[in-house]
Image: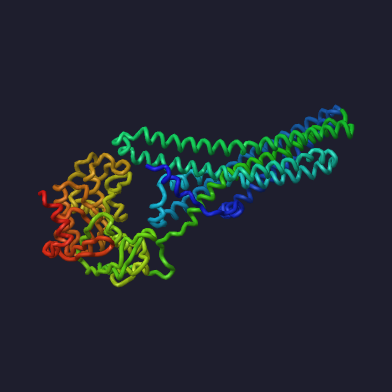
Amino acid sequence: MSINAIKDDEQMSSVSKKTTMIRLFRYLLAYRTTIAIVILIMLATVAISIINPLLIERAIDVHIANRDLESLIKIIGLALAINIIFILLIKLRMYLMAKMSNDVLLKIRQELYTHIQNLSFNFFDSRPTGKILARIIGDVNSLKDVLSDSVTTLIPDFVTISAVVVIMLIKNWRLALASLISLPLMLAGLWFIETRSHLRWRIHRKKGSNLNAFIHEDLSGMRIIQSYTAEDETEADFDILLKEHRGSFMNAIVINDAFFSVVDISWGLGTIAMYYVAIKVMGIGVDNVGTLISFGMYIGMFWRPIMNLSNFYNKLITNISGAERIFDILDTKPEIADSSNVIDMPVINGEVTFEHVSFAYDKDTKVLNDVSFKVKPGETIALVGPTGAGKTTIVNLISRFYDVQEGNVYIDGKNVKDVSIESLRMQMGIMTQDNFLFSGTVKDNIRYGKLDASDEEIIEAAKAVNAHDFIMKLKKGYDTELKERGSGLSIGQRQLLAFARTMVSMPKILILDEATSSIDTHTELLVQEGIEALLKGRTSFVIAHRLSTISKADRIFVIDQGKILEEGSSDELLAKKGLYYDLYMAQFKNI
């Protein structure tokens, strides 16, 4: 497990924060009605907030000063009534915004997950699973406050600030200017902090992604770690990543917390300036206590929204990198995708043709080099050769998991690039040596090969590969719940279930990539009986290192160094005493 490998994939395109914000806020456009209702609610609450200081000023300077108890009780009753309405409106606003922001997050997460499922194998080959999980879960969750506050903070606080400034200027322009004297200081401070904060939070999210990827890989490989007593080494690596994550957080939070200090200082200076001008310059005294109190409240109503806006901007700087990482994946184009003029693949007969095909996973090394062959419908083709020769690559190109760089691949005379990927793959059965099983029942795992398969079809497929007997011995038979990756079953049992899952789809072309590698010899003989019955009349490609399992193949392709060096039946190739003969003798000389 390499820390450097985990860190490698974090290169992202550089996009301005403004572009990211606009793109993020576009998701809110689908909720125009909700936003309109919320804005009306907020305007009402802002109006109540602005009225409160005026009521207090009148109560003190008029009714209390004149000892008018009846009018004072009336104004208190009015204030109580409008503030009860204020509280109810706030609760309604919070409910509407919580629902809307969660709906938007759901949409983004669904869009991201759907897009990831359509990405090509190259995307997954180059990224640890943990990092992809971090994008789908952590980065999406980080946007919740930004989306919610974008409506509940920006609009009402801007309205409040504007209204308060107008009222203050109307009531007393000198006190208003004194209150706002520290505003330039605050703007300069916030600009200084912002220019340094965003980069630090982006680094912190990268470190969090690294940590998440390491933990996922560590837990997935726990058996190997414990088998090789590598706990101390992995703990040391984890400690390094943990310290990097903590260090990046401290670097970000130190400058981030300065946002509030700048606003607090500016607020305090503005308040001091207002009282100084009121008392020392204008000589306001006891007779105008209500005016001073109301102005003090308006100062609070001016600076508190600025504090809220600073807090929102702080959240934006903190979490906008999450949006950048999400859009970075959404902007990743699948390397394997349908063109605009594709057609659906008709029912496959099974003729497969490679025409001067060359392929490389990277630019430096060709895995296949000018490979040509033609397979008749119903033929069973075995692919043999040393590791890395290109066997799996050939079947991956047939299924169009990758696209050829040179040449063409045809099925029934149709270029695989000219038919839709879904219509192509749904007629293929692919089983690899990775016998992955999902959490769920045995029946559900087999049905995954054909989602509309009946119980009878599932049982028939299981019987064909001799999985039925061991399934019936399980606690609940086909309704037995399997744990993650089929833990609790033997390797051979997991492989038999994966084989049944492939068989239930009744594919037109069947691909078996080391499909029997984990099955014991006795079980393999039983499976071979099922294979022979099910493959009759179907084109199949079988990759196997056990040469005994492919002796009945119609043709055997011996592949090495990206080329088909030999071709023929097992007997024909043995008679040639070439590469196949050497492989065969190397396996059986000690038997």
Residue 107 shows up from this direction: no
**Which residue lies at the image location 78% right of the left edge and 43% below the top edge?**
165
Give the colour scheme shown: rainbow
The image quadrant of residue 277 is: top right
In the picture shown, does residue 491 fall above or below 64?
below
Residue 370, position in %: x, y?
A: 30, 68
Is 443 situated left or right of 40 in this image?
Answer: left
**Which residue lies at the image location 40% right of the left edge and 57% below the top edge?**
120
Residue 36 shows up from this direction: yes
Q: Out of 215 and 384, give the one closest to the viewer.
A: 384
- Residue sitting farthest toward the bottom: 413
Residue 449, position in %: x, y?
A: 29, 54
Residue 24, position in %: x, y?
A: 57, 52
The total number of labels drawn is 0
Q: Out of 267 and 66, give the one closest to the viewer.
A: 267
**Which residue lies at the image location 22% right of the left edge and 69% below the top edge?**
376
**Which residue lies at the image location 17% right of the left edge and 66% below the top edge?**
568
Image quarter where the N terminus lies is: top left
Residue 85, position in %: x, y?
A: 67, 38
In the picture shown, does residue 120 fall above or below 167?
below
The image quadrant of residue 343 is: bottom left
Is 214 situated left or right of 206 in this image?
Answer: left
